[in-house]
Image: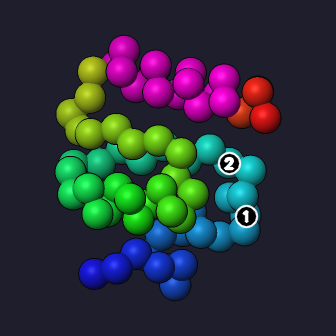
Amino acid sequence: MSATCSGRWPICSSAYTDTPILLLTTDSDSKVKKETRSLSANGWLMKPSEPERSTHAVAKLLRSRQAS
């Protein structure tokens, strides 16, 4: 199934244009990861994830937002 902006991925909505999107998922399919990045996802964490890794990913997104 292909990710499209028709509803499967609400990150496509214009309401989220300025919102960093960090996906937390069990899906390790590289095609899905590539698709979600093309739909504006900014980060990707595999579950289970250590709290430190999650904190690092959020901090990285915040730093990138401050730089832009």
Question: Height in image: 31 above or below 23?
Answer: below
Instruction: Please give the range of residues in magenta.
Output: 51-64
Q: Nearer the viewer, residue 3 or 30?
A: 30
Secondary structure predominantly adopted by residues drawn in magenta? helix
Q: Residue at 72% of width from left, 58% of height from top? A: 17
**Residue at the farthest bottom position:** 6
Image side of residue 67 versus residue 58, left or right: right
Residue 27: x, y in percent? Answer: 22, 54
The residue singled out by tag 1 in the image is 15
Color scheme of the displayed model: rainbow
Q: Residue at 36% of width from left, 21% of height from top? A: 53
Between the residue at mark 1 and the residue at mark 2, the CA separation in whole angstroms equals: 8 Å
Q: Which mark is residue 19?
A: 2
Q: Residue at 68% of width from left, 58% of height from top? A: 16
Q: Which quarter of the rendered picture does the C terminus lie within?
A: top right
The answer to whether the residues at label 1 and label 2 have Cβ atoms under 8 Å apart is yes
| Secondary structure beneath label 2 | loop
Q: Which quarter of the rendered picture does the N terminus lie within?
A: bottom left
Residue 50: x, y in percent? Answer: 27, 21
Give the class, few, some or many, for how many residues have Cα within 10 Å of label 2's Cα (few <14, many ≥20).
few
Q: Is residue 62 highlighted in magenta? A: yes
Q: Which mark is residue 64?
A: none
Mark 1: amino acid: Ala
Residue 19: x, y in percent? Answer: 68, 48
Mark 2: amino acid: Thr
